[in-house]
Image (cartoon, rainbow, N blue to C red):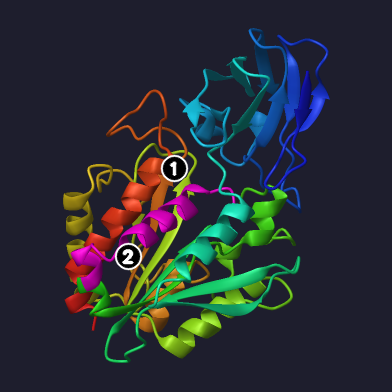
Amino acid sequence: MRISANFDGGNIEVINQDNIKDVQLAIRPDVGDEFYQWFNFRLEGEVGSQYLLNIMNAGSASYPKGWENYQAVATYDRQQWFRLPTEYKDGKLTIQVDLDCDSIQIAYFAPYSYERHQDLLASVQVHPLVSLEHLGLTLDGRDMTLVKVGDGDESKANIWITARQHPGETMAEWLVEGFFNSLLDSDNVNAQALLDKANFYIVPNMNPDGSARGHLRTNALGVNLNREWQTPSLEKSPEVFYVTNKMKETGVDLFYDVHGDEGLPYVFLAGCEGVPSHDERMAKLQQKFVDALTLVSADFQSEFGYDKDEPGKANLTVASNWVAETFTCLSNTLEMPFKDNDNMPDPMSGWSPERSIYLGEASLIAMLAVVNNLR
C-alpha cells in the first residue's frame, strides 16, 4: 500500500499504514495552523482489498459539523467522481475503500487543478469577445488573471464574478466553467441578450497559491482573503489588492462571489442586507434575483442559509459586503454544499462538478432577469 499527496492541491499526512483496516491519517493545516478540512490524496493498493482510512484529526478541523452526513469523493480515472462510504464518530473520519483498480484518488470535493485552470483560460481566450488581463503576481509568484468578456461599451452594466477565495471550495471554479460554457455559446440566445447589456469581469481563481498548496481557506501567508477587502495589501493579500483596484477602475453593477459551505447541505445566497447603504432599491433587486434563480434552478433554495446581518452591522472586510457598500450594487455570496444537496439528493455523486456547472448556467439566466434594473 502507498499513499501520496505530492501533487497539485494534495493534502494528507500518514501517521501509520501498517494495518489496512486501520490506516491512520491526518490533514495538514493551512499555513498558520488556523484552518484545515481539505484533503486530497492517492491510494495505491491491492485490487479487491478493503481499506479503512481514518483521519485522526477530523474532530479538530475548522468545521466539525461538516463531517456529519458527509461522504468523501473518489475517482479512478480522474474524470468521474463518486462518493465513498464515510462515517464520522468520536472525532475520527473513517473512509471505506473497496479497491477496484490499482490506484484511487480521494478528496474532500472534486479538485479543480491548476492545469485545468490554465486550460480554462486558454479555451475562453479564443472567443472574439474575450480578453485576458494580468492583474499581478501572488505571493508564490503565480498569475492573477482576469477574464474580460464583452465589447467594453461604457453604457453597459459591469458584472463581476469571483471564485475560490477559499481554495478548498473547488465547486466554485466548476461553476465558473459552466458559466463560461453558457456565456460563450454562440447558439445561446440568453447569453447573447445578456452580453448586449453587460460586460463581464471574471476571476476564476482568486487564490491560486492556496489551491496549489492544498489549503482550505487561506493564501500562501495563511491569510483568509475574504476578510481582507476593506484594507487589502500587497504584503498580505495581493490577490484582493489587485481585484479591488480593478473594480474601482471599472465600477461594479452586480457582484457574484462563489463559494462552498462545509456544513449546510443546500445551495443558497448570502446577501448584503447589513451594509450601511442598503436601501429599498437594493432589496428589490435582491428579491428579483433570488426569485429568478429559484425559478431556473431546482438546486437553489432560499429557506436555509445564513442569518441576515442587522442593518448597519455587516462585516465590510467580506467581499460581498465591501462591494455592496462601495458601489451600492446588487452583491451576493453564492454557497454550494460539500455534502449532498438535501433538496435534490444523489446518493452516488452528492453535490458534484456537474451540478456546479449546471448552476453556473442557471446563474446566467438569473443575471439576465435583473440586468435591466442594475443601473
Q: In the visual, does 27 lie left or right of 201?
A: right
Query: How many other residues sit within 10 Å of disc 2, few (<14), some (14-19) or many (≥20)?
Result: many
Query: How many other residues sit within 10 Å of disc 1, few (<14), some (14-19) or many (≥20)?
Result: many
Q: For the point 46% across and 51% down, which residue is it?
A: 174
Boundaries of the magenta span? 167-192
Residue 283 visible in the picture? no
- Tag 1's secondary structure? helix
Count of labels in the image: 2
Kindly identify the amino acid type of the residue bearing the numbered disc 1.
Pro
Where, quadrant-wise, is the N terminus in this rendering? top right
Main secondary structure found in the magenta portion: helix
Where, quadrant-wise, is the C terminus in this rendering? bottom left
Q: Is residue 183 magenta?
A: yes
Relative vertical location of residue 2 with respect to residue 371 in this rendering, above or below = above
Q: Which residue is mark 1?
A: 353
- 321 vs 371, nearest the viewer: 371
Instruction: Write down the quadrant of residue 205 in the picture.
Output: bottom right
Kindly identify the amino acid type of the residue bearing the numbered disc 2.
Leu
Q: For the point 46% across and 71% down, which residue is it?
A: 126
Where does the image place residue 20, in percent across and percent down from the top left? 74, 11
Where does the image place residue 187, in percent across and percent down from the top left? 23, 62
Q: Which residue is mark 2?
A: 183
Residue 23 visible in the picture? yes
Q: In the visual, does 8 lie left or right of 303?
A: right
Which mark lies nearer to you, 2 or 1?
A: 2
Relative vertical location of residue 5 with respect to residue 291 in this rendering, above or below = above
Q: For the point 27% across and 46% down, which residue is it?
A: 300
